[in-house]
Each structure stands twice: as structure tokens, then as C-alpha cells.
Amino acid sequence: AQRVTQPEKLLSVFKGAPVELKCNYSYSGSPELFWYVQYSRQRLQLLLRHISRESIKGFTADLNKGETSFHLKKPFAQEEDSAMYYCALTDQAGTALIFGKGTTLSVSS
Amino acid sequence: ETGVTQSPTHLIKTRGQQVTLRCSSQSGHNTVSWYQQALGQGPQFIFQYYREEENGRGNFPPRFSGLQFPNYSSELNVNALELDDSALYLCASSSGTTQETQYFGPGTRLLVL
């Protein structure tokens, strides 16, 4: 079964500290993976997707097929990074997004 | 470019009633997907509509149904509401069906009493 696991419900860091939001998945084949972010009082929006290999707002994510992980990283956290982060993949049909339960990132000064 | 809009923003229903939620897709998008997000959970896929036809369905009972109109806007209908249907309902639009980026609306919060 396809599944996304985000083991941390809450991650609290200080401004300037490195951040790693964990995401593990189960999937048969080559998944298309995403990170979505929801800032306070805003809608869910795409942060980055595996296929584009972009760095958005200083965040990067590397697909590790051996460990079936797609962890989100940023070397220096900013207070404006505080938000809910969801890891997701598309199902075998490429139709549905399957989301993890999300991790709340709290960055304090 | 107009983003995805949803109406209403909130509503309260009682068990057994029926509800219709509406979604207008982003300009240029022909695909609409619906998700249910219960408190503390990630969004769960309900179904997708592409050019007015259902194009995929998640693990939801038949009392969850939908429509897509020629202008690509969409409705989600839920019959015989249950307490567990209380959730945030999200609509997302995209320009295709497979692995295209989905753009989300603000959601409709449904409370079933």
C-alpha cells in the first residue's frame, strides 16, 4: 500500500539552526514526491517537488530510494518558516495526492 | 490569474442531512480534485474530475458524490451526513490529470452535529 509517514508531529528550532523535516514513504515503483506547506491563515501550497529539483525559500529535499525517504532540509531556519509541512506522493495512477499527517515547524528567536 | 475558490467557508449541518460544497477552479485548469482533512490529519483524496467525468476515487462511500460543469467548476455532495464527516474539505485544481501540480482552495469547514 502507498503510504507517507511523517514521524514528527512538532519540530521546534531556534532561528539560524538547521532544519530537517522527515518523510518516509512506501510505494511500488518510482514515486513522484512533493512537499506542501501551509502558513498560518493561508491555503495549502506547493513548496517543492522532487522532479523539479529546485530549492525554494532555501529548502531542498533529496529522494533516497534505498531508505525510501524524502526529507526536507534547510541550513538556517527563519521565523517565517514556521508553518505546517506536509509530505505527499502521487498514487500509482498519478491522480491522487497521498499526504502524511504533517509536521508543525516552529522557529523561535 | 484567479486562484481556486470555495464556498461556503463554513457550515453546520445535523446528522442525516445532505450538503453541497462548491469549487471554482483556477483559470485554465480542467481538473478538480477533492480532499477531506480531519483534525490533526493530512488531506485524504475523495475523487477527481477531469472534463466532467470522474477520473479516480479514494476510499469513500457512495454517499460522497460529485459533479464537474462545462466551465470546470465542481460540486461535492454528501448525503446522510455522519458525525465523522466533520472536517475541512479542500478542492484542488490542475491543468491535467497525471502528476500536474495541484493548486488548493482555502477549504470549507463542515461541522456535523
Image (cartoon, coloured by chain):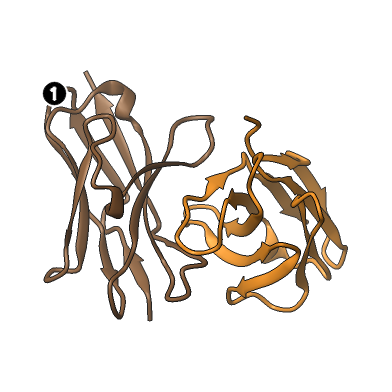
Residue nearest the observer in this picture, B50 or A48: B50
Give the percent coordinates (x, y) of residue B70.
81, 55
Q: Could you classify mark 1 by the number of other residues whose Cα lies within 10 Å: few (under 14), some (14-19), or many (20 or more)?
A: some
Residue at 73% x, 51% y: name it. B111
> Where is A85 relative to A78, above or below?
below
Dot 1: element: loop
> Where is B75 relative to A96, above or below?
above
**Quick one: which chain is brown?**
A
> Where is A85 relative to A8, above or below?
above
**Quick one: which chain is orange?**
B
Q: In the shown orientation, is residue A66 left or right of residue A30?
A: left
Residue at 73% x, 39% y: name it. B9
Dividing the image into 4 quarters, which one contains the N terminus of chain A? bottom left
Residue at 62% x, 50% y: name it. B90
User: Chain letter of disc 1?
Assistant: A
In the image, what residue type sits under mark 1? Answer: Gly
Q: In the shown orientation, is residue A20 left or right of residue B40?
A: left
Residue at 19% x, 68% y: name it. A68
Q: In the shown orientation, is residue A25 left or right of residue B70?
A: left
> Based on the displayed image, in which of its 4 quarters is residue A92 positioned?
bottom left
Give the percent coordinates (x, y) of residue B17.
88, 63
Residue nearest the observer in this picture, A96 or A105: A96
According to the picture, the residue beneath numbered tag 1 turns out to be: A16
Dividing the image into 4 quarters, which one contains the C terminus of chain A? top left
